[in-house]
Amino acid sequence: MTHFNVEAISVGKPVILKTDKGPLKTAIQKQRVEEPIRLSRLNFTGDYQADQKHHGGPDKAVCLYPAQHYRHWEEEYQREFPYPSFGENITVNGVDERETAIGDQFILGETELEVTEPRKPCYIIARKHGLLDFPEKMIDKGLSGLYLRVIKEGIVSPKDKLILKHKDPRQVTIDDVNDVFFRDKNNKAKVSRILEVPALAAGVRASLQKKL
């Protein structure tokens, strides 16, 4: 089995964040946990969303951001980004959007997780860091991160490793989904291939069906 090192597990509640463009209510200011924590089908204990229309729900129970991308952004912007600067729940070394597919399943502690969709970087990341081009660059470079649903609840420890349990045979990667949303938007063959994956998040499925 393939194992990935978990660098941080983080949770947070909505707070008012002071930014260059005024106050912003957001839960992006997550804090690392040092003790075992419960993960339910909706979230880690103590983790909430300010904008529940666009964040949260069973298909977005866990946000993962690859730890190796931090090095890229630190070189890009010549500044440090401590975990979890991008609002993710789990910061994992070695997971990659070009290799991780919708429907891939992982074990984390007592829990089992399934990949559902890419993370869509938004203005909140830009406002938090004062970098207006940040979301666009995350999309352009394919360094978006991803979401997972919880298919088995349980206790997770920051010391646990993320273990790959199952690779979806269709191999529709996170990068493939980003491709039809942001680059090759009108490629119906690519859209149809993505829609064949049962594990695809409901919201993404609805958006892609409109393209057909």
Image: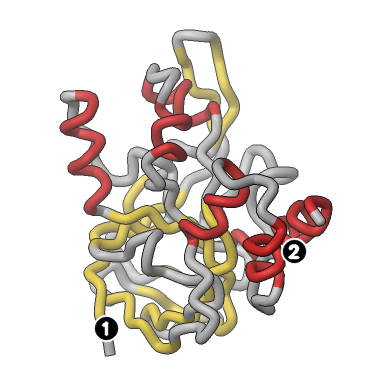
Residue 19 image point, x, y percent: 46, 15
Q: Residue at x 48, y 71 (%)?
A: 101
Tell me if label 2 and label 1 are in contact, CB under 8 Å: no
The one of 36 and 121 positioned closer to us in this rendering: 121
Q: How is the image coloured?
A: secondary structure
Q: Is residue 24 above or below residue 96?
A: above
Helix, strand, or loop for circle 1?
A: loop
Query: Looking at the image, is 141 positioned above or below residue 169?
Result: above
**Where does the C terminus fall, quadrant-wise?**
bottom right
From the viewer's perspective, is 88 left or right of 44? Answer: left
On the image, the x and y values in percent for residue 53 come to 74, 44
The residue under the point 67% across, 39% down is 51
- 155 or 189, nearer to the observer: 189
84 vs 18, left or right, is left
Res. 202 image quadrant? bottom right
Q: Which residue is mark 2?
A: 202
Camera sees residue 33? no
Give the secondary structure at mark 2. Answer: helix
- Amino acid at circle 2: Ala
Question: Nearest the camera: 42 or 180?
Answer: 180
Q: Work out whether mark 2 precedes mark 1 in sequence or the reverse, and give the earlier one.
A: 1
Question: Label 2, label 1: how many angstroms apart (C-alpha)?
Answer: 28 Å
Mark 1 lies on residue: 2
**Which three-letter amino acid code belongs to the residue tagged 1?**
Thr
Q: Quadrant of the N terminus?
A: bottom left
Q: Nearer the viewer, residue 57 or 120?
A: 120
Mark 2 crowdedness (10 Å alpha carbons): few <14, some 14-19, many ≥20? some
Indicate whether 103 appears above or below 184. below
Residue at x 48%, y 46% (from the top left corner): 12
Residue density around tag 1, few if under 14, some if 14–19, many if 20 or more, within 10 Å: few
For the point 40% across and 47% down, which residue is it? 142
Q: Position of residue 117 (x, y in %)?
A: 57, 60
